[in-house]
């Protein structure tokens, strides 16, 4: 598998544009990570391979670190899928959870790219400010390598298509979520 091109973003002209207005957004995908930082570069790889495969009413945002402001910018009524590399799980293992699936966990599973607050706290604060919780799913993949300038680890390279399929499945699942926003 050639990994050298994985951290090179798709040219802007080749990207399918995001929906024109928030009213047309049904699902927002937030991919957390930093290109050229080992397994944190997974977000850019997912973007390259997934953006054109998503329905027109799905907005994909490549973000670095998940911050409360990212969650506040999600279109009203849209469902959310957050993609991130995780610590506390075997390298390359893909896990799909509801957004609140990390609350009250006793294991070490946690997304890597979150601000100073922990992931559950970031979701909670955003929900309080928005006036209701966000509905969606979290797609995590166990990471191994994070050094600046490094490529994806072999275990994460092997998991790329599993991650893409998990994001597609999460997008489909949140569309049929009957919880009112």
Image (cartoon, rainbow, N blue to C red):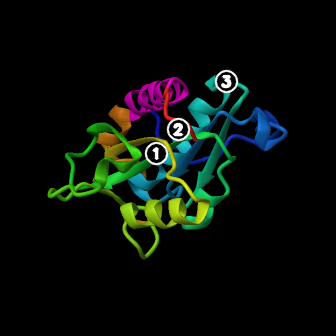
How many badges with numbers are in the image? 3
Residue appearing at x 50%, y 56% in the figure: 33
The crowd level at tag 2 (other Cα within 10 Å; few <14, some 14-19, many 20+) is: some
Residue labelled with disc 3: 55
What SS does tag 3 mark?
A: loop
Sequence-wise first label, 3 or 1 = 3
- Please state which of the two labelled residues, at mark 1 or mark 2, is closer to the viewer: 1
Q: CB atoms at circles 2 and 3 under 8 Å apart?
A: no
- Please state which of the two labelled residues, at mark 2 or mark 3, is closer to the viewer: 3
Q: CB atoms at circles 1 and 2 under 8 Å apart?
A: yes
The crowd level at tag 3 (other Cα within 10 Å; few <14, some 14-19, many 20+) is: some
Instruction: Classify the position of the C terminus by image quarter.
Output: top right
Sequence-wise first label, 1 or 2 = 2
Sequence-wise first label, 2 or 3 = 2
Q: Nearer the viewer, residue 92 or 153?
A: 92
Residue 159, position in %: x, y? 35, 33
Start-end of magenta stretch? 160-176
Instruction: Classify the position of the N terminus by image quarter.
Output: top left
Q: Which mark is residue 83?
A: 1
How far apart, in angstroms, are the residues tagged by discs 2 and 3?
15 Å
Residue appearing at x 43%, y 50% in the figure: 84
29 sits left or right of 17 in the view: left
76 sits left or right of 132 in the view: right
Q: Residue furthest bottom?
A: 116
Residue labelled with disc 2: 46
Query: Is residue 163 highlighted in magenta?
Result: yes
Residue 154, position in %: x, y? 31, 41
Most frequent secondary structure within the magenta stretch: helix
Q: Is residue 115 visible?
A: yes
Residue 62, position in %: x, y? 61, 50
């Amino acid at each position: 598998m050639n990994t050298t091109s994985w951290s090179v973003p798709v040219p802007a002209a080749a990207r399918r544009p995001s929906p024109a207005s928030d009213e047309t957004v049904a699902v927002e995908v937030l991919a957390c990570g930093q290109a050229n930082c080992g397994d944190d570069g997974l977000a850019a790889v997912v973007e390259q391979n997934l953006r054109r495969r998503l329905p027109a009413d799905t907005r994909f945002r490549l973000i670095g670190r998940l911050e409360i402001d990212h969650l506040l910018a999600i279109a009203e009524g849209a469902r959310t899928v957050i993609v991130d590399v995780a610590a506390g799980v075997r390298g390359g293992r893909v896990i799909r959870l509801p957004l609140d699936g990390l609350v009250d966990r006793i294991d070490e599973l946690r997304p890597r790219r979150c601000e100073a607050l922990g992931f559950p706290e970031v979701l909670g604060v955003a929900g309080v400010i928005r006036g209701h919780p966000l509905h969606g799913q979290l797609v995590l993949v166990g990471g191994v390598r994070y050094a600046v300038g490094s490529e994806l680890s072999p275990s994460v390279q092997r998991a790329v298509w599993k991650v893409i399929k998990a994001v597609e499945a999460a997008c489909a699942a949140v569309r049929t979520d009957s919880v009112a926003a």
